[in-house]
Amino acid sequence: MIRVATVQYTPVHGCRQSNIEAISHLLEPVEADIVILPELCTSGYFFISREELAPLAEDIRGEACGMFSQMAVSKGAIIVAGMAEAAGGLFYNSVFVFRPDGSEPLVYRKSHLFYREWQVFERGDSGFPVIRDERLDVSVGIMLCYDWRFPEASRVLALEGADIIACPSNLVTDAWIKVMPARAIENKLYVAVANRAGRETRDGETLVFKGRSALYDPWGDPVAQAASEGDTVLISEIEPRLCRDKRFNDFNDIFADRRPDLYGSICRRR
Ligand code: ACM
């Protein structure tokens, strides 16, 4: 069994330093093999210019990455954190994955930009990564919030062998509540949604974040679920081996039954 901490944390917009300290404090007592934090957890979400985002974006060799890296080593945990990334003069809405061996974090850059993210972030170019941990015998796939609307993202991760999809999020609609469990069922794997709560107002427009972070099992049932408000750490146990047999009755296997010979032309059609 592997212990997963799905963290619901609401950052204070623009207060990077105090968010880093608050996250560090929140995680101090947590004992888990995999820790998953929300999207943009050190900066807040709603940015309308690159100028205001710039001082809050993380460098892979910067302070926040250093803190999470050390924590991954001291806890012996994989830590998955959504953060704004500065790289080569550009900004990405990224997920950093810190590993217990202290190696350089792996970075996933959000593929599908949502709403005003288009105004400040570049579209990701990293593909959908799966992190294999031999010691724990688990494979962790990464996607980020709005990626949920594209079943291709979770399917690619599943085909690459993910047992659990870690999905840092800042969800502002309600549709995902119906669909995230479907991503778990259709791929027969765990899905952990680490969301935030609270609200942010910019330029007279308010975004309300929905909380309700959850870990869904391979049958789409919530193993743990947070309230719509407040910071919390959901601890769940997962059994990765359950995700490796894609049969769900004596005749059907969701991977073996696929018909990629029929999908190609549809996938290319706009
Ligand atoms: C989202 O992608 N933050 C909805």
Image (tube, rainbow, N blue to C red):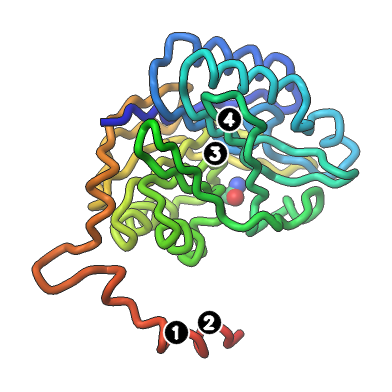
Circles 1 and 2, Cβ within 8 Å, touching? The answer is: yes
Viewer-nearest of labels 2 and 4? 4
Horizontal and vertical percent position of residue 254: 27, 68
Q: Amino acid at mark 3?
A: Phe
Q: Amino acid at mark 2?
A: Cys
- Disc 2 and disc 4: Cα gap in Å? 34 Å
Q: Residue at x 12, y 73 (%)?
A: 251
Give the labeled residue for mark 4. 98
Viewer-nearest of labels 3 and 4? 4
Give the labeled residue for mark 1. 263
Going from N to C along the chain, the mark reached first, 2 or 4, is 4
- Disc 3 and disc 1: Cα gap in Å? 35 Å
Going from N to C along the chain, the mark reached first, 3 or 4, is 4
- Disc 4 and disc 1: Cα gap in Å? 36 Å
Residue projecting furthest to the left = 250
Give the labeled residue for mark 3. 209
Going from N to C along the chain, the mark reached first, 4 or 1, is 4
